[in-house]
Amino acid sequence: MLSIDHVGLWVRDLDRVCAFYVEHLGAVAEARYENLGKGFVSRFLRFDSGARIELMTTTILSPVASQPGAERMGLTHLAFRLGSQSEVDATTGRLQSAGTVVLSGPRKTGDGYYESVVLDPEGNRIELVA
């Protein structure tokens, strides 16, 4: 059976982004991995569903930075399914109160989702859907 094992995100501030997903979206942070010879540090975030995100930082490579919330070719957002519209409302409200940028919603979309779109600390688009 084919399934996505994880999604990798380059980040500038590994600890800050890790804390965001742990505090606001319920991730469990796994052990930090470091390969100092390659200037690479990563940390996996695990969610109750089994989904994982690998947060990575580097001192050797120069990943191309995008403007926060930029629509770009390739990976453009991560969507997290919450249990209900009221959970989307509540989570969006908590994130907004904590200073998270809310780009849209909560609202019903044309493709049938109830969603809001927020930015993580490094400007990655996060959809909260029901």
Image: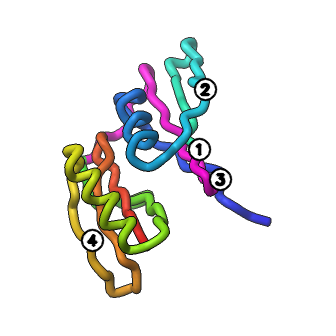
Residue on which the image places disc 4: 106
Which quadrant is home to the C terminus? bottom left
Q: Is residue 58 found inside the magenta-colored segment of the image? A: yes
Residue 96 at x, y = what percent?
Answer: 22, 52
Label pair 3/1, CB-CB below 8 angstroms: yes
Residue on which the image places disc 1: 46
Tag 4: residue type?
Pro
Tag 2: residue type?
Ala
Residue on which the image places disc 3: 50
Residue on which the image places disc 2: 31
Residue 25 at x, y = what percent?
Answer: 44, 49
Q: Is residue 107 above or below residue 33?
A: below
Tag 3: residue type?
Gly
Label pair 2/1, CB-CB below 8 angstroms: no
Q: Which residues are magenta?
A: 47-66
Distance, label 4 to label 3, CA atoms, is 25 Å
Label pair 1/4, CB-CB below 8 angstroms: no
Nearer mark to the viewer, of 4 and 2: 4
Residue drawn at x 28%, y 52% is 94
Please tell me whether mark 2 sits on a helix, a strand or a loop. strand
Label pair 4/2, CB-CB below 8 angstroms: no
